[in-house]
Amino acid sequence: MSDERSLLSQSYVECGRRLRQLHSLIRSGDGDSDQAEELRDEMDDFWIRMSPEERIWSGELSADLHILGENVTLTQDQPTDGALRQRLLDAGRREDWIELRSLFLADADSVGLFDRILFRAIYWAALSDFESSLEFLKFLATRVEANQSEIDDKQSNLDWLIQASMSSDQIAFVQGLGRVASLQLAQVADEINELIKNIELMRSSRSGTENNAVAWRKMKEMFFQAEKHVSEIPILAA
């Protein structure tokens, strides 16, 4: 793992914390509240004390946090373009974070919502901003669980299938897809929650030791495993 940001300044850390709080208020419709304005004023104070590089990272984080406001069901969104997905995975495996970021920004419409969130979580974890990585992972965990509940509800209710004038064979086929999707989403949810636990452990141990490097390599594979499993979920089941 690159140690480029292994020692984030306290000003960046504090600015990032307020930035995440601000975006949470924006998503809830309170972006113009007194609390939001107070956060903006506090961020200005930390901004002055940050290095030029940290100001760039802060701007990147602000841009990324907007993605959490997208109200799209994970499996109803278009899947990531196959060739682009492979380039994203390749960039992540060789830890070329500049290339990874340029890829998911350059052709955002070709990247599915799950990957738009997950690759940002990888980006911020790899660059030692664990709090921001957790923000994306926890949001992703709630979306995965909600998506699984939606699929389970549909599979327990045949009315929508009957109203679509489906034959018994077609109904059985769709229900089969739904069962597969639900099981795979459950697996992905477990993997995301395990990632959250590991990121929290790394956040509490920022020493940059060899053990942390080993933990990062294992955790990076967990990211890619979750991405692989969600890419295999049957789209029709949603």
Image (cartoon, helix red, strand yellow):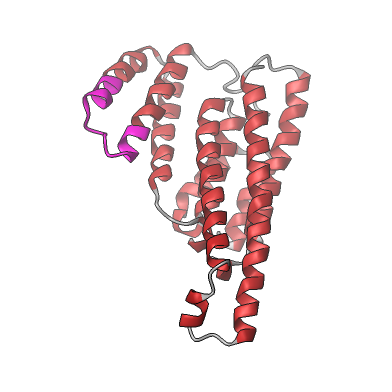
Would residue 68 appear left or right of 37 to someone viewing this image?
Answer: right
Q: Nearer the viewer, residue 77 or 25?
A: 25
Would residue 32 appear left or right of 190 to someone viewing this image?
Answer: left
Would residue 138 appear left or right of 61 to someone viewing this image?
Answer: right
- What's the magenta region? 24-40
Which residue is located at x 49 percent, y 59 percent? 110
Which residue is located at x 67 percent, y 44 percent? 190
Q: Looking at the image, is 221 positioned above or below residue 148?
A: above
Which residue is located at x 56 percent, y 49 percent? 145
Q: Nearer the viewer, residue 103 or 72?
A: 72
Q: Nearer the viewer, residue 170 or 102?
A: 170
Give x and y (percent) for residue 175: 62, 72
Give x and y (percent) for residue 187: 69, 50
**Which picture quadrant has residue 35?**
top left
| Quarter of the N terminus within the rendering | top right
Give x and y (percent) for residue 66: 38, 41
Q: Looking at the image, is 190 positioned above or below residue 61?
A: below
Give x and y (percent) for residue 112: 51, 56
Q: Looking at the image, is 177 positioned above or below residue 58?
A: below
